[in-house]
């Protein structure tokens, strides 16, 4: 996969948090603000998305969703629904596997727990004999 440009990363973050032209309060952030956050997290789109989603909830959370004028009550569900969507994004950002996660196996001896090299499908230079061990 090719490396994304900063502009592509910004466009993707905008799409993920709903900072699009159909949003009633578009634009929520400037491209400079997106760039600043991306630089802060070393270009990590998932981390930047989470930060921008948290910031967006602060903006959207301040929107009045109910007004009463005499006998007339006007309500909308934009803010509560947006906050619910952002809560999901903030707490479960596309259920990705955490960075730097190391595999761990319990219940087998040490010689069979060697880490497999995913690039050449071998275990320490020897071809794997099965999906569960390196045949040592």
Image (spheres, rainbow, N blue to C red):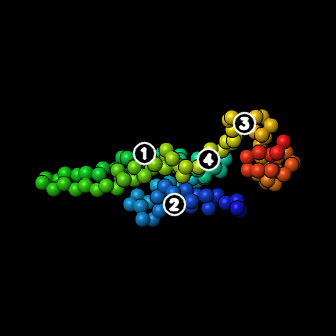
Secondary element under disc 2, as helix, strand or loop, is helix
Marks 2 and 4, the one that precedes in the sequence:
2
Q: Which residue is mark 3?
A: 108
Query: Residue at position x 42%, y 65% from top?
Result: 22
Secondary element under disc 4, as helix, strand or loop, is loop
Q: Nearer the viewer, residue 30 or 60?
A: 60
| Quarter of the rendering containing residue 136 | top right
Of marks 3 and 1, the one in the foreground: 3
- For residue 83, side relative to residue 15 (left or right): left
Secondary element under disc 3, as helix, strand or loop, is loop
The numbered mark at residue 15 is: 2
Query: Residue at position x 79%, y 53% from top?
Result: 121
Badge 1, how many Cα within 10 Å: few under 14, some, many 20+? few
Residue 95 in the image: x percent, y percent? 55, 49
Q: Which residue is mark 1?
A: 58
Q: Are marks 4 and 3 in contact (CB under 8 Å)?
A: no
Marks 2 and 3, the one that precedes in the sequence:
2
In the picture as drawn, the residue positioned furthest to the bottom comes out as 22
Marks 1 and 2, the one that precedes in the sequence:
2
Secondary element under disc 1, as helix, strand or loop, is helix
Marks 3 and 1, the one that precedes in the sequence:
1
In the picture as drawn, the residue positioned furthest to the left comes out as 71
Query: Residue at position x 67%, y 47% from top?
Result: 42
């Amino acid at each position: 996969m090719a490396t994304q440009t900063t502009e592509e990363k910004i466009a993707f973050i905008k799409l993920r948090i709903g900072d699009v032209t159909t949003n009633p309060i578009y634009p929520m952030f400037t491209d400079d603000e997106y760039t600043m956050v991306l630089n802060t997290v070393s270009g990590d789109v998932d981390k930047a998305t989470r930060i921008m989603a948290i910031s967006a909830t602060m903006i959207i959370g301040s929107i009045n969703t109910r007004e009463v004028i005499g006998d007339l009550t006007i309500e909308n569900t934009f803010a509560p629904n947006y906050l619910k969507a952002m809560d999901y994004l903030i707490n479960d950002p596309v259920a990705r596997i955490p960075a730097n996660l190391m595999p761990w196996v319990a219940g087998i001896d040490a010689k069979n727990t060697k880490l497999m090299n995913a690039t050449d499908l071998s275990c320490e230079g020897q071809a794997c004999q099965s999906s569960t061990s390196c045949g040592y």
